[in-house]
Each structure stands twice: as C-alpha cells, then as structure tokens.
Image (spheres, rainbow, N blue to C red):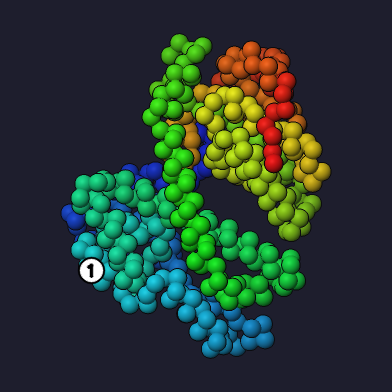
Amino acid sequence: MSERSPATGTQPAAPTAARDAARAQRHPSEAPENPAPEDNGTKHRGTGDPAAEIEPALDDPLADLVEAMKRPDQVDGSTPAPARDAVRELERRLLGADRTMRRREMAAGAGVSLLSARKIWRAMGFPNLGDEEVFFTTVDQDALKLMLNMVRDGILTEETAISLTRSIGQMTDRMVVWQVEALVEDMVQNQKLSDPEARRNLVNLLPELISPLEELLVYSWRRQLNAAVHRLAVRAETGLAASAEGRDGSEDDAPLPLARAVGFADLVSYTSLSRRMNERTLAQLVQRFESKCAEIISVGGGRLVKTVGDEVLFVAETPQAGAQIALAMSREFAADELLPNTRVALVWGRVLSRLGDIYGPTVNLAARLTSLAEPGTVLTDELTASTLAGDARFVLEPQETTSVRGFGDINPVLLAPGTGSGLVLD
C-alpha cells in the first residue's frame, strides 16, 4: 500500500501548501517592496518571510518544447526555423499576447509591490525569474489585477486569494501534464510513433484542441461548482445530525465540521507487480485502476478525492452510499482479469476538508482498516456498522478485536453485499 502521512492519511504536499498560504498576512497594496535575492538553484523554506522563499530557477518556458522539436539528426544543437516558428506561434495563441514585460514592470502596471505580485504568481506555479527576463504579457497583468482587486474590494482576504489561486495553479498543472501524456501515449500506441516523435507532433496537434478543451474545462468547473452548492448548508446539517447517532460527543472527530463516509481502495501486490512490468503495461494498469474507480465513485454519487499510485481515496455523503461504492469496487475488481484484487475500507465520521483533500481521525482509521482487510474484502468499523445495521442491502460480520496503531483496540466488521443488485454500472 502506498505510504501516507500517519497524521492525516494525505499527501505530504498539502500541509506545505497550507503553511505557505498562511504566511501571506499583509494587504497587497501595503506590502513593502523588498525583492528576494536571486535564486542560486536551491529552495529555502520555513523562514516565515515570503520574500525569503527562493524557488528553483527554471529555463525559458519554450526550452523543453523547442528541444523536443529538434530533428534527431541535428547533432549540432540547432533548432530548425519551422520548429521555432511553430512553437512561438503556439505560445502566442496560448498566452493571448507576446511576452513584453519583466516582473517589475508587470507588478508596477498592476499597482502592486513586487513582493505581493510574487506571492500571486508563485501560487499560480510560475518560476522564479531574474529582473531582466521578459516573461509576462498584458494578459498576465490583467489576471493579477483581477485577483488583487477582489482583495482591495474586500471580497477576499489576501490569504484566501492566495489559497484560491494556488488551487487553480496546482489543479491546472496536473491537468495539463495528464492531457499531454495521454495525447503522447495515444500517438505512440495508435500511430506507432516513438515517444520523441509524438512529442514533436504534439505541437502541431495542440492548436486544434485548445478551444474544445478550454470550453470543456469551463463547463466542467461550473457543473462541479453547482454540485458543491448542493452539498452545502442543509445537506451538511443533515449529515452532522446523522453522524451524531451512537456517539456521546467525546470522539476525536467530534469538533470537525463535515460528516462523510470515507473510503480507501488499495490494489493488492501492486509493488511486486510493478517491478515485473514494463512502462507501457504499468501505465495501462494504473490508468485502468483509476478509470474504473472514478466511474464507480461517480455512479455511486461520491467524490474521488485523489489517487496515489495504487490507492484511491473517496468520500460519500451517507454511510449507505459509501458502502455501496466500497462493495462495487470490491466486486468489479474481483471480476476484472487484468487487475489484481483490492482491499477496501469504509468509515463514517467527521472530517476537515482543506486544499481539496480531507483530514482527521476518520481518514486515518479508514487507512488503517485498509491495511487490515483481506484481498477482495471490505472492512468497516463498529460504529459505521451500527449505522448500516438493519439495511437488507448489507451483511455485517464482526471480526476479532484488533489493536490498531493510534486507535488502540478496535472491532473491525466485514461488510458484504446483502439483497438487491447493489450499485449498477452502465
């Protein structure tokens, strides 16, 4: 099973992101102009001073694309003019304007100090830049003004603005990497190109995809935000009331604000299998696992929080919905001849949701139970089992008391399907 933080069951990067966002306390217009020293290729953290955080310097953002566009027979390192032209034309279309401004000019045009501008563009994932590098466009400047004006108008605090900006930067970065690799893989498999050839051809393919992918991104964001609205207020209160059943208020997760069914699914023997697989086979296994999990969770009305290699973390708004998803995962993976079995665990409790992730004892307990589950089975805890008791769709079989690190003695319960067809996939 993949490693998780023992305290949260989440990625190590999340606490760093939260700590970075919390450092930004001053209003952008009031932040003093005190540029950080230029980077020497290292990263310094934990100073408490945003100006002292030095990110690794990156080359011209066109460098990788230009390198990929070189023909294999060019051993002198030169880049053909058509390749350079194609890359620069693609950049103009993607950025919306030519790069004409250095960082000080961009910040000054937005009416903000360099330090405050740096906080925003680092949150977006921009590299550290030297004073003389022409990197920014008028579109970059307008985007900076957009976020800063929401702070100046009192709509957002600076800390919240940076957190929202970081969410966009991190999610779109992962999305772009995912899309590029999917397109490259498609050309390698279906057009029989080599990986370098596919990456060169991608520059010519992307112009046809920019508009449809952009439209799909905005559409999906609106639909997801609408779904989040429906999870607010009334449904949150209903969940908290339901989660109070069988509790006396002294539980570790009692102060946390959201009631959720938290589930983990873990591929059995993934580490040993991955050592015997070539790159293509491993990629197919991981993609099939993630795709099948995403489909089951979506059909069951849950939300896929994240995948970490051989493991997926999901949430549902009721214990019954979570149990249906967990059982469907176990069933579908057992029937899949190309994938190994899974260990699955589900716990109903309260969580804290931050940075797109979830935290708290409920998450930790679900992770611990996953490691205890036998291949092809679903485990839950005694309290979750009590909320499912009496529902004919589920069979609950108490297991031997087990000592679990951080929780002491717990009473795992085997969750199995009862009457009915369970979660039906199209």
Residue 344, image x and y in percent? 67, 31
In this view of the protein, which residue sits in the foreground, 242 or 279?
242
Q: Is residue 242 left or right of residue 166?
A: right
Q: Is residue 28 left or right of residue 77?
A: left
Local crowd at mark 1 within 10 Å, few (<14), some, or many (≥20)? Answer: some
Question: Most extreme residue toward the left, as rendered?
Answer: 30
Residue 60, image x and y in percent? 45, 74
Quadrant in which residue 410 is drawn: top right
Does 213 appear above or below 416? below
Q: Name the residue located 72 percent from the left edge and 44 percent from the top edge.
A: 271
Question: Most extreme residue toward the right, as rendered?
Answer: 337
Residue hosting label 1: 109
Q: Is residue 228 left or right of residue 319?
A: left
Q: Name the residue located 55 percent from the left edge and 87 percent from the top edge.
A: 82
Does 3 appear above or below 287? above
Residue 160, image x and y in percent? 32, 45
Indicate the secondary structure of the residue bearing disc 1. helix
In this view of the protein, which residue sits in the foreground, 293 or 367?
293
